[in-house]
Amino acid sequence: MRDREIIQRIKDATDLAALVGQAVKLRRQGSAWVGLCPFHSERSPSFQVVAERGFYHCFGCGKHGDAFTWLMEREGLAFPEAMEQLAQAAGIEVPRQRERPAAELDLEARLRQAMEAAQAFYQRKLSESAKAMDYLKGRGMTPAFILESGLGYAPDGWEALLNHLKTLGFSAEVAEQAGLVSRSERGNHIDFLRDRLVIPIMDARGRIIAFGGRAFGTVTPKYLNTRETPLFNKSAVLFGFHRAKGQLRDGALVVEGYFDVLQLHQTGLHQAVAPLGTALTEGHMQQIGRFTKRVILCFDGDAAGLRAMEKGLKLALPMGFDVRLLLLPQGEDPDTWCMALGAEAFRELIRQAPDWTDFIIRRAMEGKDLNRIPDRMAAFKEMVSYLAFLPPSTDQRALFGSLAHWLEMPLSELDLAVKARASEAAKAQPEAIDAPAVAPVADVDDLLRPILILCREPGFLARAAAVPPAWWESLQGAALLQCLMDAAGDESHIPPEALAQLRMLEAKWSVKDDAELLPEQIFMKLELGFVEREKQALNRQLQDPGVMVDPAMQNRLAQSLENLLRRGRQLRGQMMDQRRKSFSR
């Protein structure tokens, strides 16, 4: 069986409303299900699931997809993983792909088993360590949350974990490949984490891929992650993302450390994530961007925290994020500040986090004397690289006016500099792949709308392809129909922009109470529309001075017009008969 057929079988067997309904509260409206969008913050529902056609669409943020994209975006799965999970739920056997050698798959499975065994070991040892339990109590961790988070303790011994893993049948080599043990200067295998509080690091699916170790007292380094492995790439993982991914409607709260995330999650603020001892990377932001385009950067108020904010801004703004900044008082971090204020007060701080403009202006002007031209120019250059990412608005014009006044420079010069920087940023972006221009949904002709809806069904698409192109090629939205015909119904061959428009069109149609589509009526209306357009064209030709002095041409056009009038009457009669039959049923 071909891959395309298997994918379609899985789609047909998956109840998309039930799948999405696990994360979104949905209610029935017409033939669709509606609810608050899980991808952006909103008060009125604009998110729709059209289960009968196997897709979802948000009219607010434009997010759309099917069961596969839902799992890929919400669970962080690759397409083969999403297909395997959906197939298993539907009871469909999927032929195994041979893209990865069996040995590689076996190794991955063995590494995951070793990580699970290590986790159980560390958790058991935690209850035996008064020092570790006292530390967690001092950090405000409750016994229930300690258990839920899988926190543990690595004993102060060279081979405690290694010996335990050997009793379970794991070799020292597998433990080393999993990052759980390392080699001493003599080449012996020893535990990587020793006498440390252990924090499990999960991937987006909630599977253990590494461990972080927190030292006690003045031991350095204070935090230590197990090394990178086939399961773990530090620069691509956000700590806490497996909990946060379903809670990002109000934006992702990016903090600095493990305990910032843990404390916020414990108090119910599950939108918090943190990089693992590295600066934010493009991979981190892409991961967040699958769920939300709003990011709140929350760092310490010290010099290092301010530098981290600047770096985060420079990364997030060109990627189209709405960035907010939450700067904490000197000496405080999200962990301690949340404990001091309480969850609700901290949540309000997040809601009211200001945008980045004030921060950047203050940073650019810090330590500068605006009475001196060199200082003014230095401040100007620092600000321009950020100002290019402000969307045009009355607020933007007011801000630019104030800056031009402070910097004692013409507003026009500021505008030119910002436009030049924006142009440079646009050139730096990858070139978009050309796709057929498609009309916005609002511009699709009413005659084409039902055809575009039914053309997603193979049988109807074949009928539509047999219709004379002259009937529809001049109508608004013809490019969408052409895309469907060119793709022969295969969504993977439809350009993304066109697919988004089609899903929006179907979502709008699905909420109608009377969503019945009668193919015969549709094609008769389409032909009648063509007849009416042709009649108008012929009448214009008959009024042309050149035609009016050519009797032969007049006769030919008049005969054509008569044929069109006759066909129009036939179509109207047939449509009336169809309506009577439908009413009599």
Image: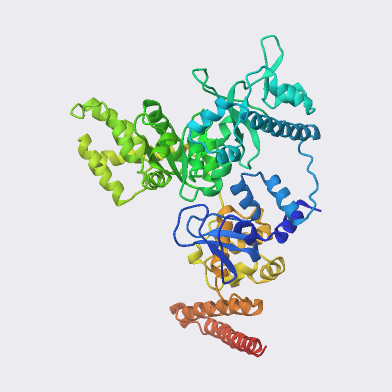
In screen coordinates, is 521 left or right of 459? Answer: left
Q: Is residue 95 above or below residue 178?
A: below
Q: Nearer the viewer, residue 343 or 436?
A: 343
Picture quadrant where residue 566 is located:
bottom right
**Residue at image point 66% right, 57% down:** 487
Q: Nearer the viewer, residue 294 or 525?
A: 294
**Residue at image point 48% right, 45% down:** 269
Q: Quadrant of the C terminus?
A: bottom right
Judge whether residue 176 can be spotted in this image. no
Q: Position of residue 342 (x, y in %)?
A: 41, 43
- Scheme by which the image is coloured: rainbow
Q: Is residue 437 above or below residue 271?
A: below
In screen coordinates, is 88 left or right of 467? Answer: right
Q: Position of residue 266 (x, y in %)?
A: 51, 42
Q: Position of residue 183 (x, y in %)?
A: 68, 15
Q: Is residue 225 above or below residue 557?
A: above
**Residue at image point 51% right, 22% down:** 222
Q: Nearer the viewer, residue 359 or 36?
A: 36
Judge whether residue 351 can be spotted in this image. yes
Q: Position of residue 474 (x, y in %)?
A: 54, 68
Picture quadrant where residue 303 is located:
top left
Q: Which residue of the protein is positioned furthest toward the top in this rendering?
A: 186
